[in-house]
Amino acid sequence: MCLGIPGRITAITDAGRLMALAEVSGVRREVNVACVAGNDIDALVGKWALIHVGFAMSIIDEDEAARTLEALRELGEAQETLEQMAHSKEALQ
């Protein structure tokens, strides 16, 4: 399963190597933008992309990024609830 997490590209760090700085949920990391660079790498700054294992895989719009982040938050909350339920069951045994 491949999961891309929305991140905003904030700066180009090395145009020759097609590397950029992306902010993913408040965490900044360097990512490769070769898959989305096109002719003008500088045009990526400020855009949202789906980030997977250090690569910007596709450009998405801000609304799609917000919806995806919300869905990921809900999945995280659901996972936390399931884990709490599992621990509660263990406590009863």
Image (tube, rainbow, N blue to C red):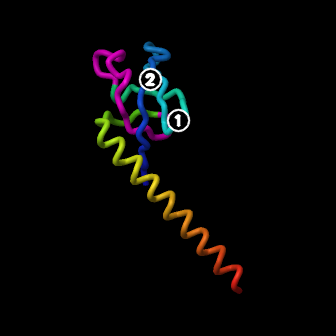
Q: Is residue 92 left or right of residue 41?
A: right
Residue at point 41% right, 31% down? 8
Q: Is residue 40 magenta?
A: yes
State the residue in front, 7 or 31. Answer: 7
Mark 2 secondary-structure assignment? strand
Q: In the rendered structure, which amino acid carries the disc numbered 2?
A: Thr
Residue 64: image location, x then y, percent: 30, 43
Dot 1 or dot 2, earlier in sequence: 2
Callout 2: 10 Å neighbours few (<14), some, many (20+)? some
Q: Quadrant of residue 46?
A: top left
Please provide percent x and percent y for residue 19.
47, 21
Vertical order, 42 against 53 (above or below) = above
Q: Position of residue 5 (x, y in %)?
A: 43, 43
Tell me the quarter of the picture where residue 43 sits. top left
Quadrant where the C terminus lies?
bottom right
Label for residue 50? none
The disc placed on residue 26 is: 1
Q: Residue at x 55, y 34 (%)?
A: 27
Residue 29 is left or right of residue 5, and the answer is right
Q: Secondary structure under badge 1?
A: loop
What's drawn in magenta, residue-wise?
37-54
Which residue occupies 61% across, 70% down?
84
Q: Is residue 31 above or below residue 81?
A: above
Q: Is residue 39 magenta?
A: yes
Query: How far across and down, in percent of the image, does residue 91 sit?
Result: 71, 80
Q: Which residue is mark 2?
A: 10
The reply to whether discs 1 and 2 touch (Cβ–Cβ < 8 Å) is no
Looking at the picture, which amino acid does disc 1 mark? Gly
